[in-house]
Amino acid sequence: MKLSIVIVSYNVKYFIEQCLRSVQSAINGIDAEVIVVDNASSDGSNEYIPPRFPNVKWIACKDNGGFSHGNNVGFSHASGEYLLMLNPDTIVTREAIHRSIEFMDAHPDSGAVGVKMINKDGTFAMESRRGIVTPWVSLCKATGLCRRYPESRLFGHYYMSYLDKEQVNEIEMVSGACMFIRKSILDKIGFLDEDFFMYWEDSDLSYRILRSGHKNYYLPYSIFHYKGESSIKSKLRYRYWLYSSLQIFFRKHFPVYHILSYLPLKFVVAFLKMRIHYANPLFHGKDWENWVEPPKRFIVIGSEKALGEIKEILKANNQTEQHLYITANEESLPQGHLTVDNSKETYNYILYDSESYSYDSMIALLQQTPGNTLRLATYSTETKVLITDDGTVYIAK
């Protein structure tokens, strides 16, 4: 078998459903298997997904052992020459899957490969490639120097942003959101380190691959990443796990860095923990993590059937803003939302019917309007589910 795709899922049943639909389309023509490891979801994933995807190997864990543990369970059941560690909050393209395999076939020195990840607004996701983290690199990240001076090799090493994102490049760290791995290397150096419950496990694995004598690469083939729907939403909780895991990474690979950064990181972790559990609930109430969503205004493009269903869904969910509906498909309107003048309106979502536009087309079109007000939303007449980037899911009644 050529490819084993391993996806760890936790309470994201509609996102993983969409992810699997994109995967099924993307792996056409490849001898591949798809393995989903569910980390004890409580949202009905175990009852909802398997009947809809009978060809997917579904493994239900009784407990949530973390991201690393879940992937290791999947790896142990995989038989492919290559493994793809994939987040459930992604939409993959045929080009990214096929070209990555072709590249690894042609480059036996490649241990792991990452691809170009696209944000909700069509911009390039900086975490698509990263450098080895040192105290200096961490400081540049924490102070924002890496974003202020992205072209600088001195300040921009965290994201290796001085490299051309449209070119193949050798990098140091590959993102675990979409990471192709040569299984023979994984069998040699070991699976993911389960000391990392969340975050930095991909950096640890990338670093061990480099130490094994192989190389890690970035390829400019796009996928879409919602970023965050498969993890804790709160930025404070995200930072807590991020810095906690960074301590483990330093302790394991760079003892000197661990000593230098131990007290500062301990302070940051303790401060974040105090804010999460005590300060924010005290000053902002128990619902301090909630926020008021701005009104959603959609440009909707799809079949008449899809548009009719979407109108009913939005009405049923009190989305009474003025929306723009366009009956079209990939053949009749190949430029999609690019044909719409959005300068005089305040639409903030482009909503594509996935039966009228392929996921590959949606992502390609989104990249042509990077950084504007429009973010990607999708709807399927097959599943009757509308998904937005902020995690909101509308379901037909």
Image (cartoon, rainbow, N blue to C red):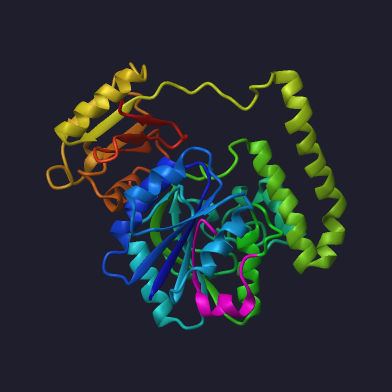
Q: Position of residue 157 (x, y in %)?
A: 63, 60
Whether residue 179 is in magenta: the answer is yes
Image mark count? 0
Q: Start and end of the magenta stretch? A: 176-192
Q: Quadrant of residue 25?
A: bottom left
Dividing the image into 4 quarters, which one contains the N terminus?
A: bottom left
Q: Farthest left residue?
A: 332
**Foreground pick, 195 / 327:** 195
Whether residue 204 is in magenta: the answer is no
Q: Position of residue 142 (x, y in %)?
A: 70, 47
Residue at the location (63% across, 74% down)?
190
Q: Quadrant of residue 80?
A: bottom left
In the rendered view, does 349 fall on the left or right side of 246? left
Residue at the location (32% across, 19% down)?
316
Residue at the location (65% across, 57% down)?
200
Q: Position of residue 390 (x, y in %)?
A: 47, 34
Dividing the image into 4 quarters, which one contains the C terminus?
A: top left
Relative height, residue 106 to residue 325 (above, below): below
**Foreground pick, 194 / 339:** 194
Q: Position of residue 147 (x, y in %)?
A: 60, 49
Relative height, residue 29 to residue 385 (above, below): below
